[in-house]
Image: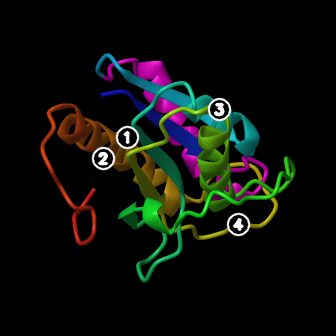
Amino acid sequence: MRALVAGVGNVFLSDDGFGSEVARRLLAAGDLPDGVDVVDVGIRGMHLAYQVLDGYEVLVVVDTAHGDGPPGSLYLLEHDLAATSGDAAFDPHGMEPDAVLELVGALARGVGTHGLDRVLVLGCEPAHLGEGMGLTPAVTAAVDEAVAAVHRVVGRLTERHPFTPVGDTP
């Protein structure tokens, strides 16, 4: 199984840099299994769309996500690939994760390759998404747990243990 872990976010918008920080720590540790790659995508959604076409079966997106928990809460969600039409418009300046997944479907069909089998999102509830450098204390405290959660998720995937993220703790 080939998996790509992608840290997504804008480091100039405070907690939006969460995904990039998690990716940075995963890259520094370098201890994920063979076949699992990590990339800090930042705000370069187009690059992520093209990188996914390199034969990955699973994409794990690490980003901020709004839920019902307090800042720093982690959520593990699964994107419904069946709901993805693949009809995304090309917009290199506004490539949100949903648009990237739409584009991946369109590109995979266009070049005749296999698309993703599964997309998981490890999200963190932000405290502040306004201009500013650095994560808030609540989100900073969640980074180590998010790194551990990526290891657990990747472990389940590489060992081919089925799991359903809904209601699952990361």
Identify residue type, mark 1.
Val
> Residue 77 occupies which quadrant of the picture?
bottom left
> Looking at the image, which is closer to me, 79 or 152?
79
CA separation in Å, label 1 and label 2: 5 Å
Q: Dot 4 surroundings within 10 Å: few (below 14), some, or many (20 or more)?
A: some
> Looking at the image, which is closer to me, 145 or 47?
47
Front of the two marks 4 and 3: 3
Verify CB contact (< 8 Å) between mark 1 and mark 2: yes
* Rendering coords of residue 92 (x, y %): 85, 47
Which residue corresponds to mark 2? Answer: 149
Question: As displayed, is residue 129 above or below residue 89?
Answer: below
* Rendering coords of residue 97 (x, y %): 63, 56
Which numbered circle lies on residue 111? 3
CA separation in Å, label 4 and label 3: 37 Å
Verify CB contact (< 8 Å) between mark 3 and mark 2: no
Magenta range is: 9-32
Q: Secondary structure at mark 3?
A: helix
Which residue corresponds to mark 4? Answer: 129
Identify residue type, mark 2.
Ala
Q: Dot 1 surroundings within 10 Å: few (below 14), some, or many (20 or more)?
A: many
